[in-house]
Amino acid sequence: MANAATAGLEIVAITDHDTAGGWDEAEAALPDGLTLISGAEFSCAHIDDDGQRISLHLLGYLFDPDHDGLRAERARLRVSRLGRGRAIVDNLVADGVAVTWNRVVEVARGGAVGRPHIARVLVENGVVGDVDEAFRELLSTSSKYYVPKADGDVFAAIRLVHEAGGVSVFAHPLARRRGAVVGDDVIAEMARAGLDGIEVGHPDHAAEDQAHLAGLAGELGLIPTGSSDYHGANKATVLGAFTTDRVAYDALFDRPTARRPVTRRAAGDALP
């Protein structure tokens, strides 16, 4: 939160993968004048007509974290991440790669274990030079060490976010370097299912991708957002590299939601 204020941001969202565990800590650390949007990024998948499974991420903002259905889904995804992370480490260890499960768990600090934590241990042990290299060489979807997650159906996730009083945004839809992406027809189907917005500005989107997504958002009535997708030391992207236009922000969060953005005033009171 302090880094967000230093970067000159007025509003920042916290959207850790499949958990709301950092919300209270983030709110407690909120500097004067900075507004916090609570949310989470849900691991989802779509199966196309040819049976190809495509991973995609759904951002849920300002939902009720105690909603039974969404809380159960977050728990399921976290358990899946734990087993999947252990399986990836076991695959690496079997090939003599210097990494241990105990250290990966320590790096995750009690949070949902993911590939970035494995990558950091690989860097720490000198196996690779940085996190990006770890993903390129050892942890990508095409790697022999890769193990898929038990992702949820994206249409079910949209429904759950809405049932929990949140708004939904399709994260980095054209991030091709991460793997296969869905077509415009699937995005249109997501819009018909109630999707609220689509991420246009993102570090993994080329200029032509951003232009295409902006046009698609207009056609489908989706609110175009932007995000740096900041991951701390795990990525080179700086905090605030991409942002959401104020008009889009107002349109997205003018909708009824279970929670409201929180701003800390100079007096120290957090107000909705």
Image (tube, rainbow, N blue to C red):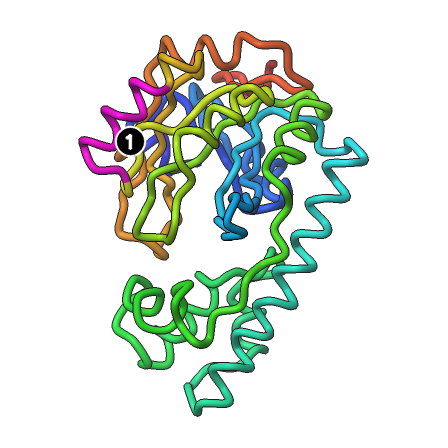
Left or right, residue 67 beside residue 241: right
Q: Position of residue 5 (x, y in %)?
A: 36, 30
Left or right, residue 151 beside residue 188: right
Residue drawn 44% across the image and 90% down it: 95
Residue drawn 65% across the image and 20% down it: 259
Residue drawn 34% across the image and 69% down it: 134
Left or right, residue 100 beside residue 181: right
**Region rendered in magenta:** 205-216
Q: Amino acid at mark 1?
A: Phe
Above-or-below relation of 34 to 1: above
**Residue 208 is inside the magenta segment:** yes
| Quadrant for the C terminus in the image | top right
Mark 1 sits on what residue? Answer: 242
**Res 79 quadrant in image:** bottom right
Is disc 1 placed on a helix, strand or loop? loop
Q: Position of residue 126 (x, y in %)?
A: 31, 81
Q: Position of residue 76 (x, y in %)?
A: 72, 52
Above-or-below relation of 222 to 228: above
Q: Main secondary structure of the magenta part?
A: helix
Q: Nearer the viewer, residue 224 or 63?
A: 224
Q: Residue furthest left?
A: 207
**Residue 22 is inside the magenta segment:** no
Q: Position of residue 35 (x, y in %)?
A: 47, 21
Q: Nearer the viewer, residue 123 or 223?
A: 223
| Quadrant for the N terminus in the image | top left
Q: Nearer the viewer, residue 207 or 52?
A: 52
Left or right, residue 38 beside residue 188: right
